[in-house]
Amino acid sequence: MPIILQSPGTNLFGSGADILVNAVNTRGVMGAGLALQFKQRYPSMFAAYRDRCQSALVSIGSIDVHIVETHSPRTVMVANFPTKEHWRDPSKLQWIEAGLVALRQVIIESQARSIAIPPLGCGLGGLDWSDVSNRIVESLTPVAEAGVDVLLYPPASRN
């Protein structure tokens, strides 16, 4: 199964994916962009994420996973993917690379059939979409080839 590039501006929440990836910081703030939409849609996930950040349990290169919906036989998880430390700071490509290693493991361990991934670090984080998308494709092609639908959402406008 190839990695499927979605149309720019398409809504990740309507993807039907088992895992929804949310680009976050390690400070427990979801104040803008897609992260704010996740906070509003899943307030208990946000509260748990904020508490984990305050306890220094969310770090670059880790994935903070929360089950947000259970509809037999399907479970929906949010994978909070740290792309920056402080919400004001830019993202770093090496942080995306480190997080992708952890994300690949989450996909395998959860036995997810599908995952929806936004343009990690490309909005307020300031990274270039072509660099980030290349890293995502490189890292997640093995799980896509194993049958996982990898839905990749580009930025609404190119950086």
Image: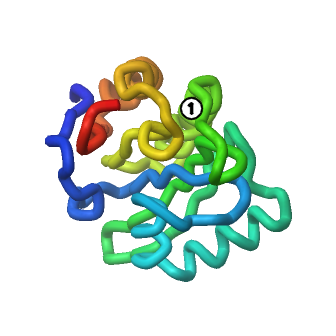
Q: Is residue 20 above or below residue 1?
A: below
On the image, the x and y values in percent for residue 73 come to 31, 70
User: Which residue lies most toward the left here?
Assistant: 7
Between 77 and 152, which is closer to the camera in this rendering? 152
Amino acid type, callout 1: Ile
User: Secondary structure beneath disc 1?
Assistant: helix
Image side of residue 128 versus residue 3, left or right: right
On the image, the x and y values in percent for residue 37 come to 40, 69
On the image, the x and y values in percent for residue 111 come to 44, 48
Mark 1 crowd level (few <14, some 14–19, many ≥20, 10 Å Cα): many
Q: Is residue 107 visible?
A: yes
Q: Is residue 25 above or below residue 132?
A: below
Q: Give the colour scheme shown.
A: rainbow
Image side of residue 43 versus residue 20, left or right: right
Q: Give the position of the C terminus as an image quadrant.
A: top left
On the image, the x and y values in percent for residue 84 come to 64, 43
Residue receiving disc 1? 96
Image side of residue 60 versus residue 80, left or right: right
Between 112 and 35, which is closer to the camera in this rendering? 35
- Determine the residue positioned at 59% across, 42% down: 83
Q: Give the position of the N terminus as an image quadrant.
A: top left
The part of the image, by quadrant, that contains residue 40 is bottom left
